[in-house]
Amino acid sequence: MTCTENRQTIVIDDTTLRDGEQTAGVVFSKREKIAIARMLDSIGVGEIECGIPAMGVEEQAGIRALVDLGLSARLITWNRALVPEIEASIACGVRAVDISLSVSDQMIAHKLRKNRAAVKEQLKVALGFAKQHDLYVSVGGEDASRADMGFLVELMEITRSLGGDRFRFCDTLGIMDPFTMFDKVAFLRKAVPEVDIEVHTHNDLGMATANAIAGIRAGARFVNTTINGLGERAGNAALEEVVMGLKHACGLETGIDTHRFREMSLFVAKASHRPLSVSKPVVGERVFAHESGLHADGVIKDPHNYEGFDPAEVGLTRSIVIGKHSGTGGLIERYRSMGIAVERKQATPLLELTRAMSCRRKRDLTNGELMSIYLGEETLPKAA
């Protein structure tokens, strides 16, 4: 299946407030959680995984505060497949729950110290209780990427028979590649077509975004993301990367307004105390910065030469950087942006000075430094 063949409605389930906050050392205040939830809601995210009620009264109070906002996005909580935890979610006022079970033989035997029959029985009890209370239910298959596929089909059949709404296929350890993700999700989609599939991917091998998109291509309708890719260990699939990847690599619209991505990323970076890399895909400060002469010249002539999408689409702007690799075209354009008209014959000696200064200072140059060069206040260093 190609990207364009999958035209089903894609639902972003953002888990910044749950899995994102599970990043080692990250804690969001109630005020920050409210702000993040409102931002996600404002851009059109369909579902927000908003916390773990079983953690205690403080977490429950935060979830209730989100419920009281009356957001358009559906709020869903994470729970183990245990009746008391589902009861705690109900008490918070949410109407949707994820009930999670370990589904790989590795975890069943060495974490739960149970067997497959016990897992199936646990699912029946928890899912039955949740549906008796008219909850929307996602059955979360922890470590599904290492589970026996036949066993996953059995669990999905139980999900279908008891009225479960979807099955979450989790690459909990972040060890899958996109090709295997596609094959496994496509297999499950064909085996139990009545149950929607959700993909939850981790980034331990740097493939979370690719795996998330592969899952969608294979027929998953729901995809988990976090802002900036926060999450356990190496993190989750980044909201901004998944949405822009689906749009520009696959031609699939998610209904998300992307113009606030940079703003949201900066807010979450500050709240999480996880600085945003300048080269972070999609939202990094310098992903639309051009220095090398060839690239700068091409972008100046037509941005489409070296930019896959307009930086304004994600709340960024283009910049021409002057440094060691700059050419005369870029230098002329940078001076023009400073209100200074420079002819090409004049640019050649100026370029020699800018390159020399950049090499001495091991960075690109500021407007102030470019002005001092233009005014003749800088000369080439004498040869040793």
Image (tube, helix red, strand yellow):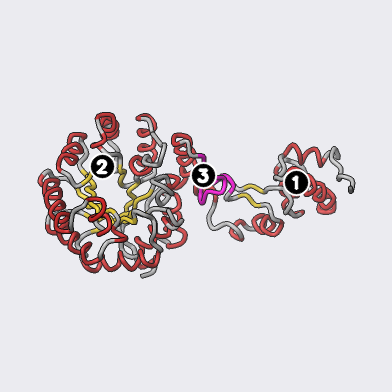
Q: Residue at x 44, y 38 (%)?
A: 268
Q: Which residues are magenta?
A: 275-286
Residue positioned 42% across, 58% down in the render: 246
Q: Which residue is mark 2?
A: 77
Instruction: Say few, some or many: other residues with alpha carbon within 10 Å of mark 1 (under 14 / 14 to 19 / 20 or more).
Output: some
Residue for badge 3: 315
Residue 296 vertical position relative to residue 50 in the rendered view, above or below = below
Residue 40: name its quadrant: top left
The type of residue carrying mark 2 is: Thr
The residue singled out by tag 1 in the image is 358
Residue 69 appears in view? no
Of pointers 1 and 2, the one earlier in the residue sequence: 2
What residue do we see at 59% from left, 47% from top?
286
**Marks 1 and 2, how far apart at CA:** 52 Å
Where is residue 341, by image quadrant?
top right
Q: CA distance from mark 3 to mark 1?
A: 29 Å
Q: Is residue 364 visible?
A: yes
Question: Is 32 rendered above or below residue 200?
Answer: above
Q: Could you tell me what secondary structure mostly forms the magenta stretch?
A: loop
